[in-house]
Image (cartoon, rainbow, N blue to C red):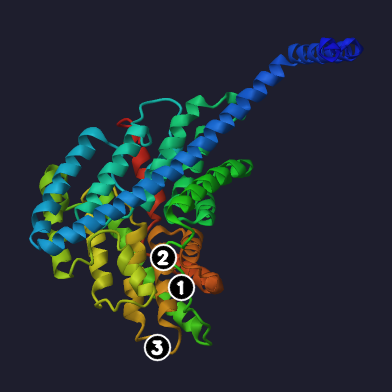
Amino acid sequence: MAAFAMTPDFSSLRPVLDAFVARLEARLQRARAYVRGNQAYLLAQSRIWLGRLVFWSCGIAVGLAAVAFALLSDLAAETFAHATGRYPWLPFILTPLAGVGLLWLTREFFPGAQGSGIPQVIAEMKRPDEGPWRPLVSLRIAFGKIVIGVAAVGAGFSFGREGPTVQVGASLMAAVGRFMPATLRIHRAHLLVAGGAAGIAAAFNAPLAGIVFAIEELSRSIESRMSGVVITAIVLAGVIAQHFLGNDNYFGRVVVFGVSADLAYAILLCSLVTGVAGGIFARLLLTSAIGWQGRLADFRANQPYAFVLACGLLLAALGSASGGMTWGSGFAETRALLVGQADLPWYYGPAKFVATVLSYLSGLPGGIFAPSLAIGAGIGQDMQPLLSGHAFPTTIVVLCMVGFLAAATQAPITAFIIVMEMVDGYSLVIGLMATALVASAVSRLISRPLYSTLAEHMVRQQSPPGKE
């Protein structure tokens, strides 16, 4: 009982506890004094990190938007192909009527969403500080770009999603600019570049292509110190895209490149042919938007819905005659050519060319990157008999893809980086670079640069009458 009556003696611990409490109070006092003395600095740092967090979150949002755009576009294209397989007459009703409805939605609710999206971003970067300006990037436009773009692909129009994703990414970045503290010193133009480049990187699942696209096409006047901001957005968007879409390349892994002593001849011929074809393609698109004259141009200006109805009927007829190959972005046909699982008819490239021009004439939101790659692949297949023994068939297809894309956009560095990353063509990098540069130079003899010229036209349209 005596053992249970004993109580522990903590008196010896009291000095230790008192000393610990005293040290803790002293540290708290020093912390309070530091906060009081550096309150302005700590507040500024917290605002900077909050701004960075907002910016990084937007980079992730761009990646998620690109993934959603890709999955919805693929689903729409597959649904349209399945429906037309069961009901061959469906495109003759759905494509023209959908074109009319989508054009009405675009003009009434989403002005500024027409076309590719890249010229809009370039034009928005030249927005004056004062004066009237109709926005070319906004959350409303981004929403319309995705919804109408997906619907257009699902109705049989020959569009891609890569260019529109640039406008979507720029719109998202511009929208979060208001939440970023001034201490970050990020100009609105920097946000547009970062968002657009992140969009192209996520759309193609090719981060390096996004960096090059930002430098070559978007940020010619942007200070080099902003490269870290651009790269951060690109990496975040690319990581999100790879998480949902996998680590595979856009068109898979192409392993049938090889080396030939006569490869230089193939490069020269492919670059010349695609340079001429891509230059004509760009010239047609520019003419349709700037300076198109004649009865057909007057018909489109005065009766836009009747014109898009006619375009829809022509697209339905062209797709029906080609077995459905000209509908959609052309991704499936291009992939089949690259992996050697298809032998498409000789007219696939020319038919896709016409289908893409018709789709662009309609005035609906949609890009030309993926269709341009498909046209180039079709040209490459047609050139294989001419270059037999000079290069492998897959090599010819890839060279013509990069050549036509470089000629159409006149952005050769972006073109060969995109194709190189998409097909894992690092062993052919010199050939891709040479083809892109030569094709782009040939295209310049035929047409002005597509995106920058369209952007200049959009800026002029924004100017008040008499000040152009």
Left or right? Give the position of 341 relative to 106: right
Which residue bears the numbered disc 3? 388
Asked if disc 3 and disc 2 are in contact, CB closer than 8 Å, the reply is no
* Residue 19, image quadrant: top right
In the image, residue 336 above or below residue 162: below
Q: Residue 122, how many percent across, how many down? A: 43, 43
C-alpha gap between disc 1 and disc 3: 19 Å
Few, some or many residues within 10 Å of mark 1 (<14, 14–19, 20+): some
C-alpha gap between disc 1 and disc 2: 8 Å
Which residue bears the numbered disc 2? 251
Which residue bears the numbered disc 1? 254
Tally of numbered discs: 3
Residue located 40% across and 43% down the image: 65
Query: On the rendered image, what quadrant is the C terminus found in?
Result: top left
C-alpha gap between disc 3 and disc 2: 24 Å
Tell which of 14 and 123 is nearer to you.
14
Amino acid type of the residue tagged 3 in the rendering: Ser
Left or right? Give the position of 398 relative to 235: left
Asked if disc 1 and disc 3 are in contact, CB closer than 8 Å, the reply is no
